[in-house]
Image (tube, rainbow, N blue to C red):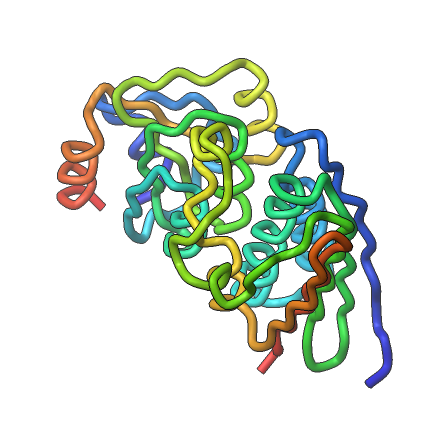
Amino acid sequence: MPDVLNFHFEVDGDDFKSAGHASFICKKNLRQLGISPEIIRRVSIAMYEGEINMVIHARGGSADVNVYEDCIEIILADKGPGIKNIKQAMQEGYSTATDNIRSLGFGAGMGLPNMKRYTDYMDIKSTVGEGTTITMKVNFE
Amino acid sequence: MKVKDLANSDLFTAITLPQGDREINGVYVGDLLSWVMGRAQSDNAWVTIMSNINILAVASLSDTSCIILAESVKLEEEVIKTAMDKEINILSTNMDIYNTAVYLSKVI
């Protein structure tokens, strides 16, 4: 599977207001490639949720979007605190976000479930104290 | 119904209208951003009382046709400017969320 295109983004962990910037640029880039709106929507939502998670929990990180012939792969990597219990974190409604985050409209415990819902493949590798890497794929077909 | 048609009605005011020709094909109501992101459909009008800048990312990425701020919720200037940059339609109404949704169900 040849690598067609890569977009790399650094996600700023201190700036809640710019959260979503990488997803927005990614969306624009994918649109320019002529990828269908529904695929772009799925990639954008999954990536934004990941981006927000990295801002809320991990003081930022990096996002790589690889466009292959048959799918789009999103790799989100951070050096945050890690996820103690992935199964629990995947449950809708479970959240460790603070009240401050909730007052901004986040922390509903929908981030990881949304990422799973909108992608065809999702893998979470996390080590407490070291960080988390999430790989997701959205197939074109 | 197009967003600009709604903006022209007496009950709504356009705060930003960079893409007035977008169609409204349905309505989604909610304030929890991730919840909205996961459930609002492309080209929905999204009715909310949330006003922080992250609503723009949600509207943009979930591809809703407009944000409708119920109960005359006000936006900071920075949010309005960013909405123009990102070409996001935002309307405002005096009505509460329930009555906004009831009205929309009649007209779209």
Q: Residue at x 80, y 45 (%)?
A: A10
Residue A44 location, quadrant: bottom right
Expressed as whole percent of the image width and height from the top left, the position of residue A139 reads 61, 78
B52 or A67, which lies in front? B52
Q: As displayed, is residue A16 above or below residue A88?
A: above
Residue A87 lies left or right of residue B99; in this view the side is right
Expressed as whole percent of the image width and height from the top left, the position of residue B12 reads 28, 24
A126 or A54, which lies in front? A126
Q: In which quadrant of the rendered image does the N terminus of chain B lie?
A: top left
Q: Residue at x 35, y 41 (%)?
A: B46
Q: Residue at x 64, y 38 (%)?
A: A19
Expressed as whole percent of the image width and height from the top left, the position of residue A24 reads 65, 45
Residue A77 location, quadrant: bottom right
Residue that protrudes farthest toward the bottom in the picture: A1
A15 or B73, which lies in front? A15
Q: Residue at x 69, y 29 (%)?
A: A15
A55 or A63, which lies in front? A55
Expressed as whole percent of the image width and height from the top left, the position of residue A11 reads 75, 43
Q: How many marks?
A: 0
Q: As displayed, is residue A119 above or below residue A13?
A: below
Residue B4 lies left or right of residue B34; in this view the side is left
Residue A63 lies left or right of residue A56; in this view the side is right
Residue B22 lies left or right of residue A127; in this view the side is left
Q: As displayed, is residue A13 above or below residue A62?
A: above
